[in-house]
C-alpha cells in the first residue's frame, strides 16, 4: 500500500483567531487530516519580519496552538517552527538557490514594504521581509509534501518554492525535492461585518473581525450591527453585506436556515433581523463548541504543552533526515544524528 500523500500548511501566530481564519483555512485543515498525512506549522520565525513585540510573540504562539487544538487539529500533526531549527538552516541553503530579482518582485514584499512606514516601522524594511518566501520554501520542502493548500495570495510563493526546488535539483543533479502542487479547495472569503467590501481581518481593527472564541454577547452584538445595505447596490443585486451574512450561514453549514432565508429573499420578504439571528445562532453554536474544548485544554495546560513539544520533536526527526540529505547533496559536512 502506498503512503498517504502529505500536505503541509502553516499559520503565523498573530493573536486572535477569527471566523475568517476558521472558515477560510482552519476548518479545511481539520478536514484534510482525514485524507492526508498533514503537517501544520505555527510559524513563529515568520512573525518577526515586521516590527513586533517579543513578549507577545511567545504568548501568541501558545495561544494559536491552543486555539488550533480547540478546533479539532490533531496534536500529532502540529509543530512549532522555532523548535525545528532545521527550517532556518535549510532556508540559508535555499537562499543560495534563489534569484534575488524574483524575491524583490514578490507582490507581498512590495505591499508590505510599502506599508512598513505607515505601521510604525519608521520605514524600516528588514531583510527578513525580503527573504521570508525562502524560509517558507524551506518550511514546505523540508517535509517533502505533495500538496500545499493555497489561497490566491499565496500562489506566487508556491511557484517560487517550486522554482527553488527545481534549481536545487538541477544543480545537485538529482530529482531530490518533490515539486509540491497547490491544493485548491473551495473556501469562503469572509468579509468584515463593519465593512462588507473588505476582508474580515485583524489589521483593520476590532470591529472588522469576529473572534471565534468571543463571548456569546459580543458575537450577537457584532452580527446584529453588521452592515446590510448601504444603499449603493445596483437594482436586483444582493448587497455585499447581505451576501456575506448568507455566506456565513453556508460556511457554518446551517443549510436549512440558509435555504428558507434564501426563499424569503427571492420572494422579496427577507427580514434582515431573521437573517442576522440565524447567523448569530450559527456562529455562537460553533464558538460554544470550540470554547468548551479550549476550557478543557486550559485545565491541562502543562500536559498540552508537553504534548506539542513531543509532537514537534517527532516531526523534527523528518526535518533532520531531509537536512542531512540536503547537506550531503550540497557538498556540506554533516552532523550525524
Ligand atoms: P492570516 O492570519 O491573515 O495570515 O490568515 C491565516 C489564514 O486564514 C490564511 O490561510 C488566510 O487565507 C485565512 N484567512 C484570513 N482572513 C480570511 C478571510 N477574511 N476570509 C477567508 N479566509 C481568511
Image (tube, helix red, strand yellow):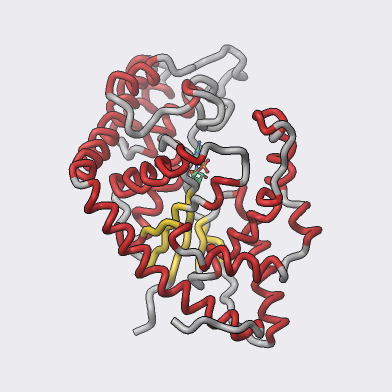
Corner quadrant of residue 95: bottom right
Residue at the spot x=33%, y=20% of the render?
218
Q: In front here: 299 or 241?
A: 299
Residue 114, image x and y in percent?
A: 74, 36
Judged from this view, the residue extending furthest toward the right is 101
In the rendered image, the quadrant that contains the C terminus is: bottom left
* Residue 73 against residue 318 in the figure, above or below: above
Residue at the spot x=21%, y=38% of the render?
295
Residue 312, image x and y in percent?
A: 37, 63
Left or right relative to 49: residue 39 = left
Corner quadrant of residue 5: bottom left
* Residue 54 against residue 162 in the figure, above or below: above
Residue 179, image x and y in percent?
A: 59, 72
In the rendered image, the quadrant that contains the N terminus is: bottom left
Left or right relative to 247: residue 74 = left
Residue at the spot x=39%, y=54% of the render?
29
Judged from this view, the residue extending furthest toward the top is 231
* Residue 98 against residue 171 in the figure, above or below: above
Residue 180, image x and y in percent?
A: 56, 69
Residue at the spot x=34%, y=43% of the render?
67
Numbered-mark total = 0
Corner quadrant of residue 74: bottom left
Q: In front here: 179 or 139?
A: 139
Left or right relative to 98: residue 303 = left
Amino acid at each position: 500500500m502506498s503512503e498517504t500523500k502529505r500536505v503541509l500548511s502553516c499559520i503565523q501566530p498573530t493573536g486572535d483567531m477569527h471566523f475568517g481564519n476558521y472558515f477560510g483555512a482552519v476548518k479545511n485543515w481539520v478536514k484534510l487530516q482525514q485524507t492526508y498525512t498533514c503537517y501544520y506549522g505555527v510559524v513563529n520565525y515568520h512573525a518577526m519580519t515586521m516590527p513586533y513585540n517579543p513578549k507577545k510573540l511567545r504568548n501568541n504562539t501558545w495561544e494559536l496552538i491552543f486555539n488550533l487544538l480547540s478546533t479539532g487539529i490533531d496534536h500529532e500533526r502540529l509543530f512549532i517552527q522555532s523548535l525545528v531549527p532545521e527550517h532556518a538552516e535549510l532556508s540559508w541553503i535555499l537562499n543560495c538557490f534563489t534569484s534575488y530579482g524574483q524575491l524583490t518582485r514578490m507582490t507581498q514584499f512590495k505591499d508590505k514594504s510599502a506599508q512598513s512606514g505607515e505601521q510604525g516601522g519608521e520605514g524600516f524594511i528588514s531583510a527578513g521581509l525580503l527573504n521570508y518566501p525562502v524560509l517558507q520554501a524551506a518550511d514546505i520542502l523540508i517535509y517533502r509534501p505533495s500538496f500545499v493548500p493555497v489561497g490566491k495570495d499565496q500562489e506566487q510563493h508556491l511557484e517560487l518554492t517550486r522554482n527553488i526546488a527545481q534549481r536545487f535539483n538541477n544543480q545537485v543533479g538529482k530529482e531530490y525535492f518533490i515539486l509540491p502542487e497547490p491544493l485548491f479547495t473551495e473556501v469562503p472569503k469572509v468579509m468584515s461585518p463593519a465593512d462588507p467590501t473588505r476582508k474580515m481581518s485583524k489589521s483593520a481593527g476590532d470591529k472588522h473581525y469576529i473572534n471565534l472564541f468571543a463571548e456569546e454577547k459580543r458575537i450577537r452584538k457584532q452580527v446584529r450591527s453588521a452592515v446590510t445595505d448601504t444603499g449603493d447596490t445596483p437594482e436586483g443585486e444582493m448587497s455585499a453585506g447581505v451576501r456575506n451574512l448568507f455566506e456565513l450561514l453556508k460556511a457554518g453549514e446551517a443549510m436549512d436556515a440558509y435555504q428558507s432565508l434564501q426563499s424569503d429573499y427571492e420572494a422579496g420578504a427577507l427580514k434582515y433581523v431573521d437573517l442576522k439571528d440565524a447567523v448569530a445562532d450559527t456562529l455562537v453554536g460553533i464558538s460554544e463548541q470550540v470554547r468548551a474544548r479550549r476550557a478543557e485544554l486550559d485545565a491541562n495546560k502543562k500536559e498540552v504543552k508537553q504534548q506539542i513539544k513531543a509532537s514537534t520533536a517527532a516531526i523534527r526527526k523528518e526535518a533532520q533526515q531531509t537536512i542531512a540529505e540536503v547537506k550531503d547533496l550540497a557538498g556540506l559536512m554533516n552532523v550525524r544524528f
